[in-house]
Amino acid sequence: MELWNFRGKQNTITEALQLDIPAHAVISITGAGGKTSLIFAWAHELAEAGKKVAVTTTTHMHRPAACISENIIFAAEDDPDHKGKVKAPMPEVIEQLRETADVVLIEADGSRRMPLKWPAEWEPVVPDCTDITVCVAGLSALGHNTADVVFRAGEIPERLQRETVDVNFLHRIISSRDGGQKGVRGDFRVFLNQVDDDLDRLAAAYRLQQIFAVMGIQSAWGSLRSSEPRIAVILEAAGNSKRFGSNKLLHIMDDGRPMAAPVIDVVRSLDVYRKIIVTQYEEVAAMAPDFDIVFNDEPELGISHSMQLGIEAAGDADAFIFCVCDQPGITASAIQKLIDAYKKGTAGIVSLAWQGKMRNPKIFSARYTGELMQLSGDTGGRQIISAHKSDLLLVEADSEDEVKDIDSL
């Protein structure tokens, strides 16, 4: 994690945002581009300083994979309609948390994992008891089409609309009383996330800080990424197997196992942030009780819908590996080669290949979330790859069996 403000590099989020946090403070986090990451990084920072911290939401948020410590309380209810997500507790719970905790951190907005957001009429949901409001914005949006990287881009007023995200667009929507400052309670701060090691983003953050300072808005910027990227493996197992003639994922192979079992076992052996399986079949879900299970009730919407359900379940992952379950020859070493190549940071999309031709599985950086969430039908991610060929890296498989998918008997 790297943090800066106009004074230079900072050691803590509290220092970077220039905050004097009062006793029993309620801090609401709005915007997009890293709210959950900011909340839990801040929670651990405060807990390490001896504070008792409560984390909750007034809307919905992803249940953290592993983030709770002795001094951190996570207070939210499981959302029965969205696997891996939680919803707001009863209103009186926030007041109870305030009385018992030194700091209450609230995720008060939703953004479908896009780096920027324009709020709807009912958003954000900032409690009246809020002492500090922090709006998060992801600078990975710079240079991209607005429609691809702004959640609810179609609702932005005409006077503020731009085709491409630049510094002027960013400061206008973040500082707008109907945008980033909507619903603010108490002191207001801006955190510009996803600066990473990108010099263009760093320059933009510095320029935005100057503009905000003139407007009386204090800001900080940086990267909430840890040194190790959080990678989620998403197994797509919801197809109708039309060409196969029956449910091929349950077809018994020569080794006596259903076709989906070898892929599930391979993913089970990997050391990754999350393991998710998207399926319409109870029998497939039963093979992976230790995975996050997401049921796809609309498989007719195509591969893209399964991908999107998986992304939503992946929470604050930095990248997604999309695997198919009809590729029984895939090996853990092949997927690990993809992970190792991605970790080098030279490409945002990494695909397994055979004889130079792209095959499955593939890794997509989370910066492509906006484009992935706009796919439809059985297009998968190929159109995104076509639009970003310079960001694609091919990793050659060790054998053709590793990349062979089974379509027919």
Image (spheres, rainbow, N blue to C red):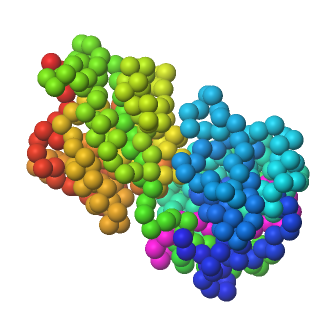
Query: Residue 154 location, x and y as percent?
Result: 63, 44
Query: Residue 129 location, x and y as percent?
Result: 89, 54
Question: Which range of residues does the magenta coloring cover?
Answer: 182-200
Residue in the picture at 39% in, 31% down: 288
Observer able to see residue 299: no
Query: Residue 109 location, x and y as percent?
Result: 70, 48
Left or right for 324, reference 47: left
Q: Which of 248 and 381 is in front in this view?
A: 248
Left or right for 380, reference 207: left
Compared with 363, 300 (above or below) is above
Residue 194 belongs to magenta span? yes
Left or right for 220, reference 361: right
Residue 329 belongs to magenta span? no
Residue in the picture at 49% in, 70% down: 196
Q: Nearer the viewer, residue 66 or 125?
A: 66
Residue in the picture at 62% in, 72% down: 221
Observer able to see residue 224: yes
Q: Which of 242 and 102 is in front in this view?
A: 102
Q: Quadrant of residue 115?
A: bottom right
Q: Which of 167 and 76 is in front in this view?
A: 76
Left or right for 14, reference 163: right
